Image (tube, coloured by chain):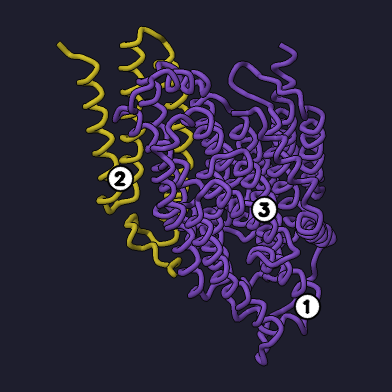
Amino acid sequence: MLTDFQAIMPILIVTLSAIVTMVAEAFQPKQERAPLAGFGVIGLIGAAAASVLLWGYDKTGFGVVRADNFSLFVNLIVIAVGLLTILFSPQVIERERIPPGEYYALTLFAVVGMMLMAAATDLLLLFLALEVLSLAVYVLTGIRRAQFQSAEAAFKYFLLGAFSSAFFLYGVALTYAIVGSTRLEEIAATLAVSDQAPDGLVLVAMGLLAVGFAFKISAVPFHMWAPDAYQGAPTLVTGFMATGVKAAAFAAFLRVFLSSFHTLHDSWAPMLWLVAVATMILGTVVGVVQANAKRMLAYSSVAHAGYLLVGLIVGTRVGEAATLFYLAAYAVSTLGAFAVVAVLATEEHPHDRVQDFAGLWESRPGLAALMTVFLLSLGGFPPLAGFVGKWYIFSAAIDAGYVWLAIVGVLTSVISVFFYLRIVVMMYMSDERALVPTPAITRSAVAGLTLALVAVFYLGLLPTHAIELALTSVQGMF
Amino acid sequence: MVTLDHYLILSALLFAIGTVGVFLRRNIITLLLSVEIMLNAVNLTFVAVGRYLGSVDGQIIVFFVMTVAAAEAAVGLALVIAIFRHGETLSPDAFTSLKW
């Protein structure tokens, strides 16, 4: 019993802080602000501490939650994502008049869903975690109710999200029909004993599960919602869902496909190979022509889903570790970039077109430098986090014989540099000056940006420790 | 004699109807209904398989799915209201503020 609760301790702590945040806003006296963000920060730090303490114990909770090093590593990534999002938020909440209690509570509940998704070892629980996470993020996307753009983005995201979870659930149902259970280890055991070729129903079930995951990670051809949802959502929520949701979905994708369906690797790898190539190419090529910075970053996140898929397809220990490391590197770089866009906006001016960045180096040298670092990291420039992530994931692909996948990955990264540099060139070398107001930046946002900057350089310059951590976290999990 | 296969085929048909509905219908409420049909098609599979296997798991799962579907419907209808307030229309063709 005690072990059960220990296994879900990080999740419990964040849930508790989310409930406290929600209740505190309801009961706070008028003209007095409860430190709502503070509750969230405390909860997330507590959950991070619990995750560190659980490291290496591999506890199982209630038979369906596994606090192995893999899920704890993902916990740390999504906690970092949640923490940075909360640090960036106060200024945005003030400006957009977003109800703070709801905003923080939903962010924390989404983090709960992400952590549960990484830890679930039962397909039904995985579905529930997916829904906890998705429902919170749908509402966050549409939280600026007064703006049609926000409502439209939220509805598109909601409709395609609900559509994709129906596919996922149908996959769960068919798996249940074949195996008679939704537990991942029983699925793996059943599939391992049948030595003949997999029959059609297994492939259909697996395909439906893959479609559900592909929607969540925004892989082509299931990426249509991403640009619209990313552009219409409040910028910080965009950063949150581009990183946290993707990390959680990839964690579950890895766990399901490399534990339960690992014996069918030969069946699903070619299918995902095509998806990965299409995702990398389309994300990059369409990203090049975007005029809106948020939309451009959305296509960049589609392209990054392709690079991350490479690690899954490779399916070796190194590939898995590379995916985890890449998720961390991608998360800090993307969040940083979105945060810069978010803090530059004012009430009248969203500051999200590429030409809005013209001459930022003159008016805001600090922010321009930060944006440059984050974008170059996403583009894969040494010595930043994104470079090490890409190098690691592509070398894993070459070691496992997926040379073409690595070649497509490298080529598309080279093209993607073009659209990251477009903003950089705008900031430094444009003669035009965008007439934009320069809002004051809160101290917590500065702290968050500094943390993201340190993380980008740390993962880029001294990646050994994080890579070793990622390697130990995938040992013995599948 | 109604066998498991009949139920599986029926639920596959329902699921297909829901999927097609999402693509073809031009009213956002009907789009929501189509998604609900998909979820309930899956529920039918769970119940039928649970009965076939002689375990209650299938039926229990359906309760979870129904709860999730209810929560989803709440969020979905709230978003429909938010959209309707802006344009006084329920047609997805009014979604024009986000394009590449």
Residue under label 1: A364
Q: For mark 1, give the secondary structure.
A: loop
* Residue at the far bottom in the pictured view: A431
Q: Is residue A299 above or below residue A244?
A: below
Residue at screen point 44% across, 49% down: A273
> In this view of the protein, can residue A150 be seen by the observer?
no
> In this view of the protein, can residue A360 be seen by the observer?
yes
Residue at screen point 70% across, 35% down: A473
Q: Is residue A144 above or below residue A35?
A: below
Residue A446 lies left or right of residue A81; in this view the side is right
Q: Quadrant of the image for the C terminus of chain A?
A: top right
Query: In which quadrant of the rendered view does residue A321 lie?
Result: top right
Residue type beneath disc 3? Ala
* Residue at the far top in the pictured view: B54
Residue under label 2: B30
Q: Quadrant of the image for the N terminus of chain A?
A: top right
Determine crowd level at label 2: few under 14, some 14-19, many 20+ residues with C-alpha closer than 10 A.
some
Place of residue A398 in the rendered image (x, y in percent of width and height, measured from the top left): 56, 52
Output the chain of dot 1. A
Residue A301 lies left or right of residue A274; in this view the side is right
Q: Nearer the viewer, mark 2 or mark 3?
A: 3
Residue under label 3: A331
Chain letter for the yellow part: B
Output the chain of dot 2. B
Q: For mark 3, give the secondary structure.
A: helix
Residue type beneath disc 2? Thr
The colour with which the image depicts chain A is purple
Q: Is residue A466 above or below residue B50?
A: below
Q: Nearer the viewer, mark 2 or mark 1?
A: 1
